[in-house]
Image (spheres, helix red, strand yellow):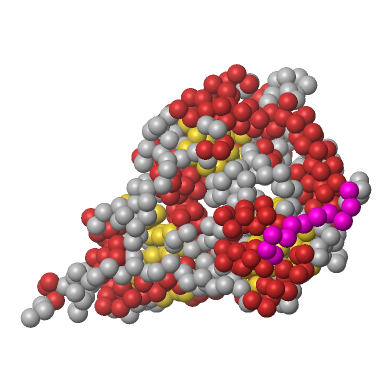
Amino acid sequence: MNSKMNQPTGAQVIARALKNLGVTVIFGIVGIPIVEIAEEAINLGIRFIAFRNEQACSYAASVYGYITGTPGVCLVVGGPGVLHAMAGIGNASVNAFPLLVLAGSAETTLVTKGGFQEMDAISLLTPHTKLSVRPVSVDHTENAIYDAYRTCWYGRPGTTFVDLPADLIQGKATNISPSAGLQLVHAPPKPAGDPSVIFKVAQLLRSARAPLVVVGKGSAYARAEEPIRKLINSARLPFLPTPMGKGVVPDSHPLNTSSARSVALKNADVVLLLGARLNWILHFGEAPRWSPDVKIIQVDVHAEEIGRNSGSGELGIVGDIELVVDQLHRALGDWHYQPPSNSPTSYPALLSASATKNENKSQEKALQVTASGKFLTFQRAFHLIKTTLNSLSPPENGDIVYVSEGANTMDISRSAFPLQHPRQRLDAGTYATMGVGLGYIIAAHAAYNLPQPDGTLEAPSPKKIVALEGDSAFGFSAMEVETLARHQIPALIFVMNNSGVYHGDAKTEEDWRILQQETLSNETRVDEPTRSSTSDKKGLRSTSLLYETRYDRLASVCGGQGFFVRNEEELEKATRAGFAEKERFTIVNVIIEPGIGQTIEFGWQAAKKDKQGSKL
Ligand code: ADP
Ligand code: MG
């Protein structure tokens, strides 16, 4: 007789379901009652990476899905845990990363009574996920998890959510075989493009005067680098990667138009858009950044994306990039693009003139030391970091994964660090989210360095994770450095410290203290009218951070090594030391020019005047 005594608990069923799905790592933070799931998962050989804030673990799980091409799994407590994890849930949905979130919740019998951490997570998450479910009993749980795992992965990737009430986690199954068989979800089936549209689009490309291939992070996610490289090489098409599409085709490729971005966008007449949306990152595909007559061929796995903004239902191809690019290549045969003329106003000539101009400008900045010689600049520091890293590990090897977030830090590093391989640059993405950095480091380490116990995936070649963090961005999840130490993740983190968001307020600590005193006395003197409407308002601005915060010391108290760096020699030495570390993480606190008085600007915004050239 199958007595209930021998039946597994909900926690065991859940852990077993994850194991059967091939999950090898869970990103999370435990509490009652989900700790039981985590413990059972660990017992089954699944790695549980315990974070310090759900925000960071949800970010980590989201990008793990992007890097590995299989869903990331995040386990958190209910109520506040889900609220914190909302950050990663939104991030995964908006970036189209596959993410499965599991959370505890109050006992079903206590609903509406004010149970422990009670919150209606299903209602909260339904609009932000592809699927949000609460299994009705332990016996139904495995199927719910299986379906949520499949759904976040198939079609356009996104987030799914399974709500797990305490009574379900702690209760027992009534009719389940404890040794249920392996239930791997097959990788998503791949659709190919409509042959008649492929034919039409190939004709259009042949007739293009100024073609451009835009390579988005959907191409990186789709692992379509091989067919895309082949197509670009054989059809000799100029291409432009989006920030996370970098490396699908090596940045060093002669047809890369990154350093002539504005000119490429403005002049292209036929665009092949491979796994990128016509959103703010691509200025909606609209004038004035693009030609008003541009014809954009969208290739996307998600049918609803076709025709959005300046896309066209007629030219759009619904399909998997790998298959569609191969179809297009076959339709084009050995045709290759030949510019109509060699005149200085021809498309290739315009591209190359703009690239030369912008590259010279960046080179100048990279070699420039500030007038006073007192501060490093972003450009100078990145140049030194890059040349040092390149001397330690040639870029062709692709042994480094770059994580980058911050305003200037991300913007400037994008062009300062060319990439030769895909999925090795992780940044703030479609949501421009600050705070992803530490979670992304941990996820990249897990994806690239941890053995995959099931043998279903080969252990990939080990990679060093190098993070370029703005000082403000770093602060969003800085406590995760303790997670780095606990898991012996030897990440090399540069904190680009200008004592502020965008820029700092003072050149010396003394000046900064004066501003601080002005702020404090303004705040306390309520009887005096403030000088708010005039430009002579004194004190610290909303963008200010503490003057030259010693982030390096955070490393030393949390099990890492820290370097305080002010000049070129110190920066090079710290870079070398951090790169050599095999177990300890390193924080290099790089003091850079505060950039006082700089306007706060963001090159991507459409309203800005066209100065994009060197930004990628
Ligand atoms: P970027 O940030 O590089 O501009 P986006 O995130 O805007 O990229 O766009 C990525 C697109 O790629 C999404 O619209 C997504 O649906 C699509 N995509 C993801 N995987 C595939 C795939 N295998 N085949 C085709 N399109 C895909
Ligand atoms: Mg800053």
Viewer-closest of 376 and 52 = 376
Horizontal and vertical percent position of residue 215? 66, 56
Is 82 part of what is drawn in magenta? Answer: no
Q: Quadrant of residue 340 in the image?
A: bottom right
Horizontal and vertical percent position of residue 93? 55, 65
Please give left or right for residue 172 compared with residue 252 in the image. left
Q: Quadrant of residue 235 in the image?
A: bottom right
Asked whether the viewer can see residue 503, the reply is: yes
Viewer-closest of 92 and 217 = 217
Q: Read off the magenta span.
A: 332-342
Please give left or right for residue 276 compared with residue 602 in the image. left
Note whether 503 is above or below 427 in the view shown: above
Q: Quadrant of residue 149 in the image?
A: bottom left
Viewer-closest of 205 and 600 = 205
Residue at (67, 68) in percent of width and height:
331
Asked whether the viewer can see residue 304, the reply is: no
Residue at (43, 67) in percent of width and height:
187
Note whether 171 is above or below 599 in the view shown: below
Residue at (73, 60) in percent of width and height:
335
Image quadrant in which the N terminus is located = bottom left
